[in-house]
Image: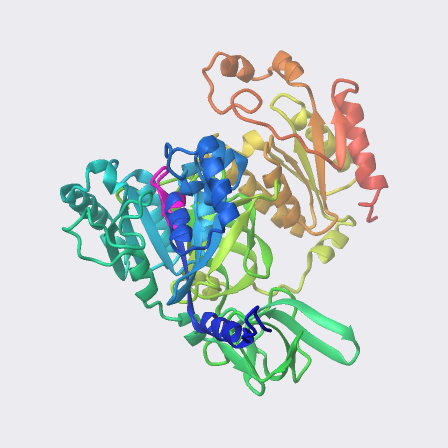
Amino acid sequence: MLNRSGLDLSAGVQAYLSRQENKTLLRFITCGSVDDGKSTLIGRLLYDTKLILEDQLAALESDSRKHGTAGESIDFALLVDGLEAEREQGITIDVAYRFFATEKRKFIVADTPGHEQYTCNMATGASTADLAVVLIDARKGVLEQTRRHSHIISLLGIRHVVLAVNKIDLVDYDQAVFDRVVQDYLAFAKPLGFDHVCLVPMSARFGDNVSTASNAMPWYDGPTLIEFLEGVIIPDSAIELPFRFPVQIAVRPDSDFRGFAGQVASGKVAVGDDVVVAHSGQQVTVKSIVTADGALSEAREGQAVILVLDDEVDISRGSMLSHPRARPLVSDQFQAHVIWFDRNTLIPGRSYILRTETMSTPASVTKLKHRIDVNSLALEAATHLGRNEIGVCNISTQMPVSFDAYRDNRATGNFIIIDRMSNATVGAGMIDHALRRADNVHLQAIDVTREARGALKYQKPAVLWFTGLSGSGKSTIANLVEKQLHALGRHTMTLDGDNVRHGLNRDLGFTEADRVENIRRVAEVARLMSDAGLIVLVSFISPFRSERLLAREMMAPGEFLEIFVDTPIEECARRDPKGLYKKAMAGKLANFTGISSPYEAPEAPDIHLNTVEQDAETLAGAVVERLIGGRFNNT
């Protein structure tokens, strides 16, 4: 390739590409409270490293006049705040990733939002970062969101921090202000375990101590931000960790090929290495390593490959291959730090979906050990976690999970929590350790099965779950159904909400957390009774869909009937057999379903009973007919 003067440019291009390829890459985030100047700082970095083209600069100047907050000056924040809502409000909402490079290093920076409601986006940006730049407005000092973000980056394993005291120009470059902010932050951050905190006073708007040293602060003799970022050494620990390979999919295009695709989460593996299937303990040998570009002799952390093994073993999506002498933990119970994102609180006992890199399983918090105060880092007793709160929980999963403690391996020690109804990501967690009782408690094999117990009674076990508002007629209909079944010689047992609260659940109130635990206990009892071969009738308001789904999944397939006793709340209030609606409407009864606490009606019940159109005796007969004359018939 020749230029107009006839000189060969290819050598120069190759040399440039070679220099870029050999530069190390640093991933970092900017975080802190709202309006501390995070987006402005990144815009300034892009400008100073000459990554803004002339047409982009012209557009930026135009946008600054329209949306900017910097007067006649360029508003560098607009380079990063790309959403219209961000520009109109002058805030960051989404995570924005930007690449830039200097002569010494390449960088990927994540601009994370400062607003409390977007904490989940901040955690997302921090999850892949090696370093955090915590910005603080010199005028405001250390705020609650500063502390929250600092705690989150500590939980996520970031050990190198730059404390950037920004907008120092607005306090006349006063060293006393800088020293006061630094003292407050270091006192708070001491328990967080950071290896190094670099302290930099700066003005992102005017560029003081960003890329060049400031003449306005002769009292500061430390590095500029860019100088520190270029020189900081971040150990490449992932390659030194034991081999971990979460399997994404089994690949079998024809009968002659069977491999397992995924990304090497940590460590390395070579052809001929022995590896172990974590959940089964089976040991096999890597026969070959296949990629789209051909075969490899070795694969390292971060590479997406297909591993072909020398033997047929039981491996599927969610399995993990590991080093035989450094295996991950495999357990269905563990302790974890959880950051909660959703406006609906985390409730112990409620069923969620827990998702790791490649597997998903139903899970629940069995115990909320404590909540962490982000201001003081004190451990507080709690019954639930609210939005943006952090807590330590014991978690139980339906299937065993392969994992490492997060402090040992970030790639295999994290998970997210998904709401089963909305499919929204509601939380994120970092695993601390497995619970010892998970290894000490095992299921005992029993020879007499539930099917054998049912056959002895000439019936198929079943759970009839009656749900509806208070006063809808659940208990009345359930009682009539049991009488008709008893007359037909069926073996039954009724679990009624009021009756159970006099014994097993007498310690529970009517808060959302207690209602969840109420249903969890009853579902467990119903499962045990169905295992005994009984037809179990459960009559509970059970207001939440997620808990009714949990109850269904506890039972054997096809043995759970959700029966919606559908009575308008006006009719329930008119009946008011216990006088509860009158008290609730007068404000004398808190957490009453339908009045001050929600009821989530079934969307697709197995049986829908309309009590306004038919009497209780007829409705009970319809349930018995469905049970005896339909798919539940076992006589």
Q: Find residue 593 and report its horizontal and vertical position in percent.
A: 56, 25
Q: Find residue 290 and report its horizontal and vertical position in percent.
A: 65, 78
Q: Quadrant of residue 410?
A: bottom left
Q: Nearer the viewer, residue 328 or 396?
A: 328
Q: Quadrant of residue 313?
A: bottom right
Q: Find residue 554 and report its horizontal and vertical position in percent.
A: 63, 49
Describe residue 446's horizontal placement relative to residue 21 as left or right. right
Describe residue 165's horizontal placement relative to residue 116 as left or right. left
Asked whether residue 190 is drawn in magenta, I would say no
Describe residue 222's horizontal placement relative to residue 258 as left or right. left
Describe residue 521's horizontal placement relative to residue 570 as left or right. left
Tell which residue pokes out farthest to the right in this image: 629
Start-end of magenta stretch: 30-39
The figure's colour scheme reads: rainbow
Quadrant placement of the N terminus: bottom right
Q: Find residue 128 and report its horizontal and vertical position in percent.
A: 45, 58
Asked whether residue 36 is drawn in magenta, I would say yes
Q: Nearer the viewer, residue 362 or 467?
A: 362
Residue at 75% across / 48% down in the picture? 558
- Residue 177 in view (yes/no): yes
- Residue 81 in view (yes/no): no
Residue at 67% across / 74% down in the picture? 292
Residue at 77% across / 73% down in the picture? 253
Tell which residue pokes out farthest to the front in this image: 5
Q: Is residue 337 above or below residue 169?
A: below
Tell which residue pokes out farthest to the bottom in this image: 272
